[in-house]
Amino acid sequence: MSLFVDRRSIVRTIWGDPDLVLLIFAGSAAEFALNRAVDWLFFTGEIPRDPIGRLFSTVRYAQQIVFVDEEKARQTLERINAQHASVEHERGQTIPDWAYRDVLYMLIDYSECAYTLLYKPLTQSQRHDLFEVFLRIGEGLHVAELPKTYAEWRADRQRHLLRDLRYSKHTSMLFQAYRRHLGAWRYYLLLEVQALLVPDEVRRLLDLNANRLISGLVQTYGIVNSFNLQPLVHSLLIPPRYWSEVRRFRRA
């Protein structure tokens, strides 16, 4: 049985690295709080009730797509489709196609941004590899009107950022949930990391300002790798009850 994602793909490298996964969801947590469809999160109540636990659940789903064969990946995609359909049926509304694209676009963009922040910019072939994998995921989730090339996606991503984001009461409520679950100083670190990752429009709407000290510390990430200090970094960013879960993110 062929793999859904080739073993040499940059997507496997990114989504098998716990530090990059945490950065991807730090950026996504900021941006989706601004999304016009964020009220769907409050309908189920799962993310406001336990945003960190929900993050880890999402990572498990992603890894059940990226690190398995075609058949198992398709089964996971259909399971996600069924869950979405169930929520839509319960609410009596349909999740907009643009909202599905927004989420898919976030995962592409923050995958690239996280890798660039900690390591180096993706090559052109790696960017196309990243896009092609998520295009297949989007098609498996029946997302409509997807761009066909990386360049088309980049242009559409910008249009979505300008059209689909706004600061609302749900934005404030979601950030309050982040603070409640992380505690004051971990929440502060989250905001600082988000300021380094998010696009200008997200930074403007959330009034985030990149901190030179935090930016400088990120530049020393190679030292963290060299001295195997990742557990210390994770303990600073994530509450203790989730540490073992973060360790399970790592994939060879």
Image (tube, rainbow, N blue to C red):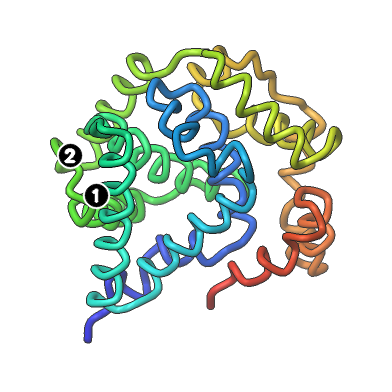
> What is the distance, in whole Å, between disc 1 and disc 2 at their CAs?
8 Å
The tag on residue 146 is: 2
Residue 172, by quadrant, is top right
Q: Nearer the viewer, residue 41 or 44?
A: 44
Q: N-terminal of the two: label 1 or label 2?
A: 1
Q: Position of residue 101 (x, y in %)?
A: 28, 36
Q: Position of residue 234 (x, y in %)?
A: 76, 56
Q: Nearer the viewer, residue 32 or 241?
A: 241
* Pointer 2 local density, CA inside 10 Å: few below 14, some 14–19, many at least 20: some
Label 2 element class: loop
Q: What residue do we see at 84% from left, 60% from top? A: 232
Q: Nearer the viewer, residue 13 or 88?
A: 88
Q: Position of residue 27 (x, y in %)?
A: 56, 37
Task: For the residues labelled 1 and 2, say whether their Cβ atoms are less than 8 Å apart.
Answer: yes
Residue named by callout 1: 138
The tag on residue 123 is: none
The type of residue carrying mark 2 is: Leu
Q: What residue do we see at 48% from left, 31% from top? A: 32
The type of residue carrying mark 1 is: Gly
Identify the residue at the far bottom of this view.
Answer: 1
Is 136 placed left or right of 109 in the picture? left
Is 76 placed left or right of 220 in the picture? left
